[in-house]
Structure formats: structure tokens, C-alpha cells
Image: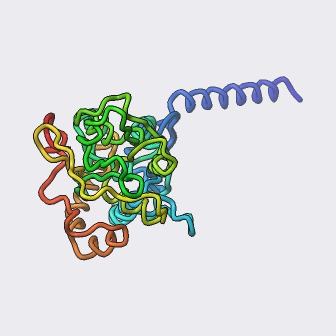
Amino acid sequence: MTSRSRTFFKGAAFGAAAVLLLLWLFPALVPGGARGPVDGAALPTLERIRRAGVARVGFANEAPYAYLDPKTGRLTGESPEIARVVLERLGVAKIQGVLTEFGALIPGLKAGRFDVIAAGMYITPPRCAEVAFSNPTYGIGEALVVRAGNPRGLHSYADVAARSDATLGVVTGAIEREDALKSGIRPAQLQVFPDAITALEAVSAGRVDAYGGTSLTVNTLLAHAANPALERAAPFTDPVIDGKTARGYGAFAFRKSDDALRVAFDRELAQFVGSAAHEALVKPFGFGPSELPGAATAAALCAPGKAK
């Protein structure tokens, strides 16, 4: 090989290395290129998921809000099914579920593990400080699971608070823990579980006296468990928080930097929620006219001091 040829190849190698270094330092030079979490991608999230044809959704495997069908393995529930409809209208053909513990959903979203939380998450002011919510898709109250015959006579959070030796199970990151504390239940009376199924098993085994969850969660869990040792406490009085009867409003959550995606999502939700198609879609999950969110909005629910 001549000295001229060696010089050429050395120069070409140096040039290629320089180009690779520039692309590594400045990934935006590559169409759609980026390093790090999704939130730092070169393309806005809405445009990126449209191009990819798929959006990743975080969920916590809690029926009837978002869960894997045990027979088919399909991600289903009120939230994923609505997400499919809305995202398809936005030009995104598919969703990909990312299973996450409920308490890790917001950190996972912010870290870029997925594009949207589709888990029926309640809108609350503390959560609003971290993520941006869509307008709600439903509104519901709460309930207690107790052992058959309700031996401790628990019909409200106030009943648990009145018995110093009574214990209540709640799911990590769920609003029920906050409501319980505001209802006078002491921290020592609470046991936190990673998911609703584990909490239900704890009631059955006598490790806690009751499990607090949404009325729909409780109904779904009891129907699937078919455990004669468990029942829903009846009657049940919803907690009164900050002078108002507690009612949870569930919605989708987005990174605050993804405002374009949230606005587009809300626009489609406004056309869909309350329609005949929406009613038919969520009916199998136990949602009906009484669970519609009415005039509730994310802006109002995010305001400090507002009902959840």
C-alpha cells in the first residue's frame, strides 16, 4: 500500500470517528435520534408516537381500571380501552402496556419509562404538582372489604379510627391512605400493600380487619375472588374530607412537558366521554351513568383545597 493510500485511509478513519463523535454528542443531528429517557427525545412525544404507531402506557394491574386479562393476556380495563380509542383518533394505532406498582407510576412516567399513565389514577393537588392530568373519565366513591359477617362492625373509616386496635389495609400510593389519615385513623393502624389482591388476601387471612378501595375495585375483587370468607361492608359511609364527601375522579396523566399530547387527548375525550360508544365500552367493567364525571375538570380538581 502506497504512503498516499495509507494517508487516505488514516484520514477517512479520522473523519468517520469525528462524525461518530459529533452524532454521539448531538443526537438531534440524526432524524428522530436521542439518548436518554423518552422525555428528552428530539421529537415531541405526540409526533414521536404518531410516527411509531404505538404509545407506551403505564398501568398497575388493578381491575377494573387497568389490568391484564388472565385468559388472553390483553391489557384491558376502563382506562386502556379508552386510551385505545383516543390514541387511534390521534393517529396512534396501538398501545403497549408497562406494568408498574401503583406508587411507582408517576416516577416511571417522569423518568420516561412510558408516555402516559392509563391506570384510572385519581386527580389530586399533590399529584398535579408532578404531572399533568387529562379531564376525568369517571367519578366514584369508596368501600371496605371485611371478613364475612363484618365481625368488627366497620362501616366507615371513622369506625376504624374509633377502634384503636382495628387495622386497615391500603395500596401503596393510593388515595385511600390519605383519606384514612384525614379521617382520624392513626398511621400505626394502617398496613400498606403493593396491590389490591395482596391486601384482599391479608383481610382473608386476618392480618388486617379491612381493606379500603374504590367501590368498583372492591366489587371487581370480590367477584373474581368468590371467597365466602369476604364481603363488602354494607352499609358504608364515604369519608368526609375537608368538609366534602370524598369522591374520586380518575384520569390519564402526562409529563408536564407533553402539553401538546395532553391537549389533543383532552379534545378527543370531550367528544367521547358520555357518548353511547363510551357507555358501551366501559359497561363491562362496571361503569355506568352514575360513574360519569359530570362537569368536573382537571383544572378544578387540581386546585388546592378542592375535593379529589
Q: Quadrant of the C terminus?
A: top left
Q: Is residue 302 left or right of residue 198?
A: left
Percent x, y of residue 118: 38, 53
Residue 15 sits in quarter: top right
Residue 199's place in the image compared with 131, above or below, is below
The figure's colour scheme reads rainbow
Instruction: Tell me, yes or no, if residue 40 can be seen here.
Output: no
Residue 221's place in the image compared with 121, above or below, is below
Residue 14 sits in quarter: top right
Percent x, y of residue 20: 62, 31
Question: What residue is at 43 percent from the left and 50 percent from the top?
Answer: 48
Q: Is residue 275 left or right of residue 39?
A: left
Question: What residue is at 28 percent from the left and 55 percent from the top?
Answer: 265
> Of residues 296 and 25, which is closer to you in this image?
296
Q: Residue furthest right?
A: 1
Q: Is residue 4 left or right of residue 233?
A: right
> Of residues 31 and 194, which is closer to you in this image?
194
> Of residues 31 and 10, which is closer to you in this image?
31
> Of residues 198 and 232, which is closer to you in this image?
232
